[in-house]
Image: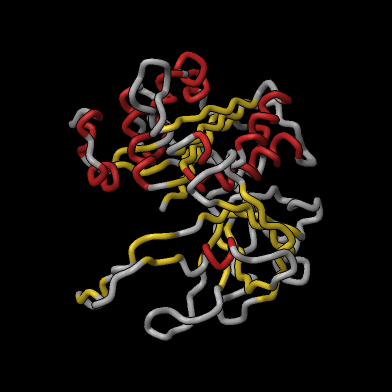
Amino acid sequence: MLTEQDCTVVELPKVDTRLITPKAPAIARVVGNLPCTYGKSNSWVRNVAIDVSATALAGKIRIGQAFGIIPPGTDEDGKPHKVRLYSIASPDAGEDGRGNILCTPVKRTIAEFDPEIGGNRRAHRGMFMGACSNYLCNLSVGDEVLVTGPAGKRFLLPADAERHDYVFIATGTGIAPYRGMVLQLLKGPAGPTRRDIWLLAGAPYTSDLLYHELFLEIEREFDNFHYLQAVSREPHAPGELRGIYVDRLLVSHLERLGPVLERPSTLLYLCGIAGMQFSIYRRLALLGLLDGYAVPKSDICVTSPADWTSTQMRRGLRATARCMIEVY
């Protein structure tokens, strides 16, 4: 594997952060709220568009960053709700071409309410509704929201985008920044890029794929854009009982995708659940493709990648400048 001094330097653009703080949030306005799943889905994800033209965020947010929303009301302890961050799904120019309208996919959070506070469980049971996600999904056009941000200065497209090829890997709402990045690269003012762009998206069901029709349309329009899907809870092929996870796409499309990952010019972006990051690391190592994207910090190399645990990878591998990670 590579040593740290061998890592390729990637120049990232300078971006603004914390123009609006949680202590002094700004008022923005909802201008769109539509489902962004592929047909009927039980995931309940909506693409919420927000007009920030009257705030310091106007024209200042860059794709790959996030903005904050402060929901109204108080938490279980009677304290005002804290800010929640949402990834920008719009290109740099926003949805309107002037940087005034940004959008983000918002997934409703519905789970059993049984938190632990101070080591003691609350006595009551019931369903927990996400304080901010459900609030956003319920908003109508014209409603006001409190916004903060921007946040983030690492998960970005490079300053000179034309020098690189791209492999974007996502699970669930982790696909949000890639919507904006793909639009920026192929339909932005400097586009369309001639470099290769691969988007690998994972979801439990086909209906859960976000912005699916948009990516299919872009794939038909641009020969250098490749869109692959991994559906985990539906049969992958006739006669199979199970689906596949997103790391399996690296194997099934290795003949075309392998040479792209081997290029020193390629940047790898991982966005979604944390477990996906480690499954991708493990798969890349097994395929001999991890060099350039992660370097060892310990004796992890003496263990077969097939036996690597998440703890080992968390402690023993460090992402290089060519690997951008945003996981939760």
Rendered location of residue 224, percent (x, y)? 66, 23
Which residue corresponds to the image point at 33% horizontal and 63% vertical from the top-left?
Answer: 112
Question: Foreground residue, 281 or 272?
Answer: 272
Quadrant for residue 62, please give it.
Answer: bottom right
Q: How many marks?
A: 0
- Image: 161 above or below 248: below
Q: Is residue 46 left or right of residue 130?
A: right
Question: Is residue 266 something one can see in this rendering?
Answer: yes
> Camera-side residue: 125 or 218?
125
Residue 260 location in percent, x, y? 52, 22
* Vertical side of 220 occupied by 15: above or below: below
Specify the quadrant that holds the N terminus: top left
Residue depicted at 42% across the width and 86% down the height: 78
Residue 327: image location, x then y, percent: 43, 50
Query: Measured from the top left, where is residue 34 in percent x and y?
Result: 66, 52
Asked where in the image residue 242 lies, by quadrant, the reply is top left
| Residue at horizontal 38 percent and vertical 40 percent from the top | 276
Foreground pick, 12 / 42: 42
Return the residue nearer the eye: 44 or 289: 44
Is the residue 190 above or below the residue 152 in the image? above
Does residue 73 appear left or right of residue 214 in this picture?
Answer: left
Residue 11 in sight: no
Colour basis: secondary structure
Query: Which residue is the extreme one toward the top?
Result: 255
Q: Residue at 46% x, 65% y: name it.
A: 130
Residue extending farthest to the bottom is 78
